[in-house]
Amino acid sequence: MLTLFALKILLISVFAGIVGSVLGLGGGIIVTPALTLLFGVDINHAIGASIISVIATSSGSAIAYIKDRITNLRVGMFLEIATTVGAITGAFLGAIIAPDWLYVIFGLLLLYSALAMIKKAKSELPENVEPHPLATKLKLHSHYYDKALQQEVHYNVANPYGGFGVMYGAGVISGLLGIGSGSFKVMAMDMFMKLPLKVSSATSNLMMGVTAAASAGVYLFRGDIDPRIAAPVALGVLTGATIGARIMQRLKNKTIRKLFIPILAYVAVQMIVQGLGGM
Amino acid sequence: MNEAMNKKQAKDEKIYDVEAAVSTFLRIGVLTSAAVIVTGLLLFLITGQSGYPEQTYPTTVTGIVTGLVEGKAYAIMMAGLSLLILTPVFRVAVSIFVFLKEKDYLYVIITSLVFLILMISFALGKIG
């Protein structure tokens, strides 16, 4: 009975790890609803396990992504300043203001970017990106070997200020609401900084681990991380993330975008509904 | 021309070194934590004993360490999970030293700043 329970959670987590590592979303988007709806786990323990799943996706996929240089470490580090400061701001802001209108604003922003992504659905790689002087100074432009296209892809980075700003917002949102801000991270890098989608997804995954680790300590001490649930989640997601990292490299950016758009729209609508409901 | 290309290659090599070091570190961290979690989980499933009363588990550092020494299944699982939680933090710390070794001082500063903010957020203990 115990073994069956652990095995079921493990299997769902493998799936969550694959999805999370391919899309750069961390896997919480699947783990939380699966645990609450399918296994009747209470929401606190489900969120505790989903924090673990975010870290497992991040660290598990980063091994492959960094080695194969899909991740842009410099972009990640530069933007992590914005997300971590944002998260602290959000944590404080939460005590002062009601986040309802922020839900709506960010929901609309996500919806807009989902629509903008549809327009970009046919383009495989960003074209004619002007290298931004600050991005040049920060050595953000880079290249990676695309296993799907079987060629070395060189890319420039645009609009680091815009990307930094949205990342700060993503940090505030995750500090305020405690929700996975993976979709914002991918959006900031894809829409504003014009990185190839694979690079955005891999870099988002790397960054998410850092933000999640900062809050995981709090969850652990509060008792929200139940080993009976979190242990199989961790093992399953680690396995899934390793598999997902291999799959993602062989997918085309176009394919990843097609998978990403409906999930983005779903998260956007959910946020708007939640925001309006609280007003 | 040739010299310029060699220089660019040398610069690229350096970046690869940073990436290789960070990737290796992550691999060790992830494999260690997974091994510890597997050990705890198997112990729990085979013996059916968590080592703790119904519905409880250690949630403090001392609690986890004491339970670990006593070989309690839940404590071993929690220790593995704690290791996993620490991997991204260590990853940032390792990056500082690797950038320092590469003499990339701009990124030594940026990465140190991220690490500092992380520590502040831990101290504030209220980040989500």
Image (cartoon, rainbow, N blue to C red):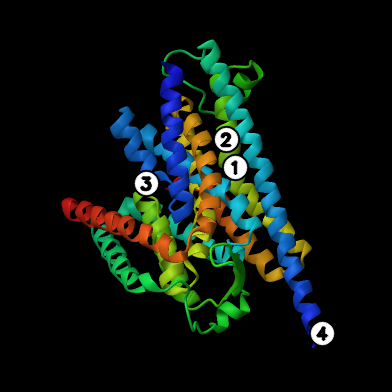
Q: Amino acid at mark 4?
A: Asn
Judging by the rendered image, the residue that carries numbered circle 3 is A29
Report how many numbered discs are placed on residues in the image: 4
Marks 3 and 1, how far apart at CA: 22 Å
Direction from residue A230 to residue B97 in the image, left or right: right
Find numbered disc 3 in the image and state the secondary structure of the residue it sits on: helix
Kindly tell me whether residue A168 is visible in this rendering.
Answer: no
Q: Chain of mark 2?
A: B
Looking at the image, is mark 4 or mark 1 nearer the viewer?
Answer: 4
User: What residue is at 69 percent from the left and 42 percent from the top?
Assistant: B28
Residue hosting label 1: B86
Q: Amino acid at mark 1?
A: Leu
> What is the spatial separation of the Cα atoms under label 1 and label 2, in whole angstroms?
6 Å
- Whether residue A149 appears in this view of the structure is yes
How far separated are the C-alphas under marks 3 and 2?
22 Å
Circle 2 is placed at which residue position? B82
Mark 3 burial class by Cα count in 10 Å: few <14, some 14-19, many 20+: many
Q: Is residue A158 above or below residue A89?
A: below
**Quadrant where the C terminus of chain A is found in the figure:** bottom left
- Corner quadrant of residue A262: bottom left
| Element at label 1 | helix
Instruction: Check contact, mark 4 vs mark 2: CB within 8 A.
Output: no
The disc numbered 3 marks a residue on which chain?
A
Residue picked out by circle 4: B2
Asked whether, in this view, residue A78 is left or right of residue A177, the answer is right
Instruction: Classify mark 1: residues with Cα within 10 Å, few (<14), some (14-19) or many (20+).
Output: many
